[in-house]
Amino acid sequence: MIYLLFESVRTFIPGRLSSAPTFTLDNYTELWQSSYLLFLTDTLRISAISAVVSTAIGFLIAHYLVREAGKTMRVIVLTLVVALMFIGIARVFSLALAFGNYGVLGIFRQMFGIRGNEFAYLQFIVIAGIVHYIAPIATLTMVGYLASIDRRLSEAAQSLGASRVQAFGGIFLPLAAPGIVAVLLMSFALAASAFSVPVIIGRGLVTTITTLIYQRFSEVPNYPSGAALSITLFCISIGIIALSSFVARYLRRRIGGGLA
């Protein structure tokens, strides 16, 4: 990372593989151009949608495992969730085949007359691929947090006359709010840094910051520009993590004070 930082303030010389050692901030100032801002907007939109969907899926599965599932079903579901995390890059290629012209999902796409190279459709399947990658991580993280909430609090509310829905909305959900926020922002950081899904499933037409970094290092090659993009994405990710920690601590204090 230190090497990237120094490389990001060096001068790019077209036609040369190495950059000049002269100091410059042009690699950062060019990121304010409309084309880069468009790539950043696409990255943030795809990441935000993927994070919300992944967090929702993770919360629903985790709530079922913690509050509803029996011991046998809990073991089965957790095993499947963990297994998804070990499949790795194979599931990305599997999704690419499934959404392809001869895949199961590709056949449904053709039935509705949707072309495979439409930008909106490609963004949709990129989001689906990122969710497939992040949802297991969000689920396991959420399970650990929801399991720490004392279920006797909701049972006490129901014994005092609250319905199951009221106990869920008034007791369980506020207590789970810090964990939900933390998982949401963690999912956003993971989605923003996803690389293989946009490259393979997006077919090179959906350009995110990560794919742009890859192009700068491998195709141009413009190492200072790629380094500046990498440092910028790193700072955004660190900011998201710091924000998640702050929001989680704030909600925990507010909820703890309210219950007291």
Image (tube, rainbow, N blue to C red):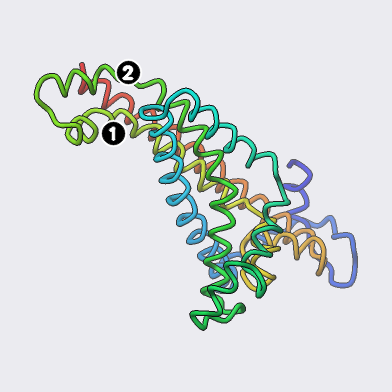
**First in sequence: mark 2 or mark 1?**
2
The residue tagged 1 is: 173
> Image check: 42 left or right of 193?
left
Image height of 78 relative to 258, above or below: below
Q: Look at 69% across and 63% down and name the residue there.
A: 199
The picture places residue 245, in percent across and down from the top left corner, at: 45, 32
The residue tagged 2 is: 150
> Image check: 116 left or right of 175?
right
The picture places residue 259, in percent across and down from the top left corner, at: 21, 20
Quadrant (top left/top right/bottom left/bottom right) for the N terminus: top right
206 or 242: which is nearer to us?
Answer: 206
Image height of 135 relative to 16, above or below: above
Q: Look at 48% across and 80% down and name the residue there.
A: 112
Neighbour tally class for label 1: few under 14, some 14-19, many 20 plus, Cα within 10 Å:
some
The picture places residue 50, in percent across and down from the top left corner, at: 49, 54
Which residue is most to the left? 161
